Image: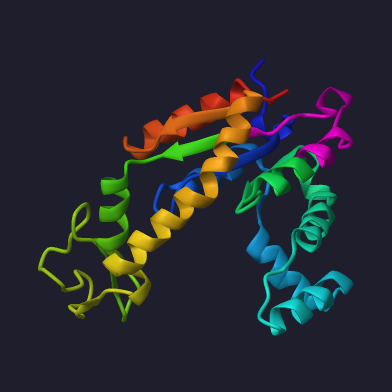
Amino acid sequence: MAIDPKTQVVGPVILLGAPGAGKGTQAKRIMELYGIPQISTGDILRANVAAGTPLGVKAKAVMDRGDLVPDELVCDMVADRLNQADCARGFILDGFPRTVAQAQWLDGYLTTRVFENEAGKGLKPVVIEIAVGYNQLFKRLTGRRSCSSCGRIYNVYFQPPKVADTCDVDGTALITRKDDSEAVIAERLKAYERQTLPLTEYYKAQGTLRVVDGDRDMSEVTAETLKALENGNCL
């Protein structure tokens, strides 16, 4: 009898990848198949601040001073979110950990964490890096154009409109977001590489890093991503 994926213990999943690598798409497909939540540190922070929780009040005070929220506070918020019922069989971490110190904290947290059954005790994270070449990423990001009227997204390299710079749906002139300029994108990609290299080396040394070729068709990327999960913690 086939096992229902939505009853499996998946454990912690960490998705790494540069902007434009397709992490969001893969996270959505994992969520749909296994029924586990995607946890974003940005969402957690905003939710705590909006709700006025004790952690949110502390974080807001830090941000109001123009400072970065310290690791200790971020980790406390993450722990609070991961202890909620929808994370009982596993979760996908998006934007966390960002540093080796955060990864070490997560390792410590997971040694005490019991998932839905005893077989899931102390599971190590399955770390999947969606690897895409620099030139491909650059085209994916700088080639984006959007319609200010209907919101449809195009890419001049991979999914161009029928008429240049014009929306297929309503004929509105397409726009380029300020964040998609070549200078901004180049700096974002360089910053990601500087920040993430120590993290990938950390997980590589632990033997938990799996690299998926993100330059291929999206369905092939999904198939390899799911295979990495099945060979990891799925119980």
The residue drawn where x is 69% and y is 34% is 125
Residue 82 shown left or right of residue 215 in the figure: right
Q: Position of residue 183 (x, y in %)?
A: 30, 67
The residue drawn where x is 66% and y is 26% is 206
In the picture, the quarter occupied by the C terminus is top right
Q: Is residue 10 above or below residue 192?
A: above
The residue drawn where x is 11% and y is 68% is 164
Task: Find residue 66 and report its image quarter.
Answer: bottom right
Q: Position of residue 115 (x, y in %)?
A: 83, 35
Residue most toward the bottom?
Answer: 64
Q: Is residue 29 visible?
A: no
Q: Is residue 108 magenta?
A: yes
Q: Nearer the viewer, residue 182 or 217?
A: 182
Q: Is residue 155 above or below residue 171?
A: above
Q: Position of residue 158 (x, y in %)?
A: 21, 52
Q: Is residue 103 above or below residue 209?
A: below
Residue most toward the left?
Answer: 163
In the picture, the quarter occupied by the N terminus is top right
Q: Nearer the viewer, residue 116 or 71?
A: 71
Task: Find residue 143 and report its image quarter.
Answer: bottom left
Q: Is residue 52 visible?
A: yes
The magenta span reads 107-126
Q: Is residue 190 above or below residue 203?
A: below
Q: Position of residue 61 (x, y in %)?
A: 78, 81
